[in-house]
Amino acid sequence: VGRLLGLVPGTRIGKVQSVLDPLFRSRFRCGESSGMLWGTGRTDADGFPLLEVHHLEKPPSFSVGQAVLTEGGDGVFPRGCMAGHILEMPGEKTPHAIVRSAVRTGTLRQVILLEDMTKEALARIEEGAR
């Protein structure tokens, strides 16, 4: 759905960048293909955000309807999170494949914030539990 860009120092208040942001970026994998998902700032008629596929290493090996997952390794999203499904293949309408987000952001009531903790922080937590 998005990522935390940063916290206001000394608070638990921060800015979240959602898939609706045209500057949204995430590494993805779909079948044998991988590349980047870019936010477009657009939604479909049902309110689902639309993302564009960029930076494919070779011609796409995916097809319409296929699931798109985060690839991980970018330090932003863990591997295997559902990003959406291929809606359109590149062609006459668009030079990029279009992904329909798996989540309609306008209907969310709750979100879970995942925090990637360093090994040192995890060690301190484990030490405190003993």
Image: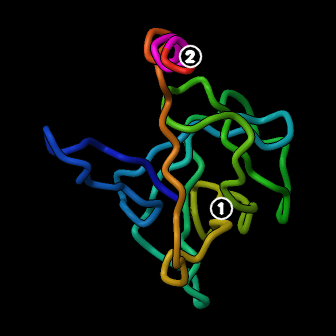
Look at 47% across and 54% down and name the residue there: 2
Name the image quarter holding the C terminus: top right
Q: Residue 114, image x and y in percent?
A: 52, 43
* Image height of 79 relative to 22, above or below: above
108 or 101, which is in the foreground? Answer: 108
The crowd level at tag 2 (other Cα within 10 Å; few <14, some 14-19, many 20+) is: few
Vertical placement of residue 86 versus 118, above or below: below
**Cα distance, mark 1 to mark 2?**
40 Å
Q: Residue furthest bottom?
A: 45
Residue, disc 2 = 126
Q: Are marks 1 and 2 in contact (CB under 8 Å)?
A: no
Residue for point 36% across, 55% down: 17
Q: Secondary structure at mark 1?
A: strand
Amino acid identity at mark 2: Glu
Point out residue 82 in the picture as x, y percentages from the top left corner.
72, 53
Q: Image check: 40 left or right of 56?
A: left
- Place of residue 20 in the rendered image (x, y in percent of width and height, measured from the top left): 42, 66
Q: Earlier in the sequence, mark 1 or mark 2?
A: 1
- Residue type, mark 1 in image: Val
The picture places residue 94, in percent across and down from the top left corner, at 58, 64
Q: What numbered label is drawn on residue 88?
A: none
- Residue 27 lies, with reference to residue 21, above or below; the image says above
Which residues, given as a range, are shown in magenta? 122-127
| Helix, strand or loop under label 2 | helix
User: What residue does disc 1 label?
Assistant: 99
Neighbour tally class for label 1: few under 14, some 14-19, many 20 plus, Cα within 10 Å: many
